[in-house]
Image (spheres, grey):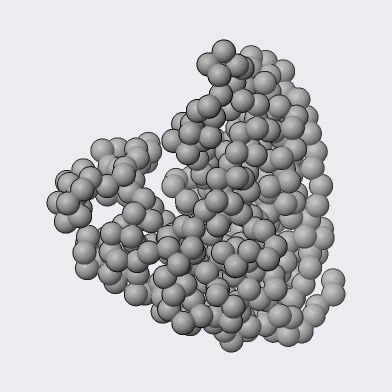
Amino acid sequence: MRVEENRPLAPLTTLRIGGPARWFVDATGEEEIVEAVDWADQRGADLFVLGGGSNLLVSDSGFDGLVLHIALRGIGVSDVSGLPLCRVYSCAAGENWDSLVERAARENCAGIECLAGIPGTVGGTPVQNVGAYGQEVASTIVLVRAFEREKREFVEFSAAECGFAYRRSRFNSTDAGRFIVTRVDYRLEMGAAPTLHYADLQRAFASRSPSASQPSLAEVAAAVRHIRQSKGMLLVEGDPDCRSAGSFFKNPVVTEDHSRRIAAAAEEDPPRFPAGGENPGKVKLPAAWLIEQAGFHKGYAKGAAGISSRHTLALVNRGHATAADILALAAEIRSAVDTRFGIHLEMEPVLVGFQ
């Protein structure tokens, strides 16, 4: 195991913000994860696990501990006979997520095609229960392998044991910091139809002839990437709207009564979506709509921090923003939404190195 000192973290995040890690380790195998955890514990050092850096805001002072970068690679594939025929992709946590989506779509395996273009690594997907355009990884995950820091052993969880909910799992809630994900197995359905529930995707194929066959999984994944790029949510080199952490706020889940009060305050009905099985009788509202109704527009700037010119939900580094700049803008937005609608927006990125 090679330990670096004062490794800059900003280049390893999509926001390009943050100070250095006091110590840094690239783990390319499970044995290095064990060694790194022991190394940190022996010194009483805090430890942070870094994946793709796409959902992080690192403190301007950096992280005064050991950053463990998960760089495990490898994908195993096995077919599961039955009706329907399924294929299991067993993926090391350091694999690029979008590359896996592209491969699965190319091999005609359905279940994650709407999650194309999401930055980051495989290991982060069960932690956040990554979801978009009508799909969540929770519906495809069959196993998560992780290292348990307390007992110093590797454990495996079924999907039911992961505690999945909207943008949540046991790994970022009740057991935050306890486990380090090393592998995720996804069961995808071979030859199944793509998921086309969301209006954006339906519009993308609206001009398709009714007599034409349904779009392929690869076509749907490409359409999702195009939609994400139009909203500044696809990492493209040189695009200033890409210096972000993606969606900075979670879509709030509210009661029907609260939704009606919001409609009265805005003098129009907000867009709304079913909240899901874990929230019966409630609805999900777009945080972007609430932000816009509270007076913030695309391209809004507050010094070196700003709102994406293409999507109100993404806060961007306009060139030399600090973490403090981003948090100041986030606080201004949250205060305005809370004052007008009585909703306290929850930030989505993980904060690293803050007290």
Picture quadrant of residue 319: bottom right
In this rendering, would 265 be left or right of 141? left
Picture coordinates of residue 201 (x, y %)?
Answer: 51, 35
Determine the residue positioned at 58% across, 41% down: 224
Nearest to the observer: residue 305 or residue 261: 305
Determine the residue positioned at 68% across, 33% down: 218
Outermost residue to the right: 2
Nearest to the observer: residue 21 or residue 313: 313
Determine the residue positioned at 37% across, 36% down: 277
In this rendering, would 109 be left or right of 170? right
Picture coordinates of residue 342 (x, y %)?
Answer: 22, 62
Nearest to the observer: residue 319 or residue 7: 319
Determine the residue positioned at 63% across, 83% down: 19
Picture quadrant of residue 62: bottom right
Picture coordinates of residue 6 (x, y %)?
Answer: 73, 85
Q: Which image quarter holds the N terminus?
A: bottom right
In this rendering, would 238 be left or right of 338? right
Looking at the image, is 166 positioned above or below residue 42? above
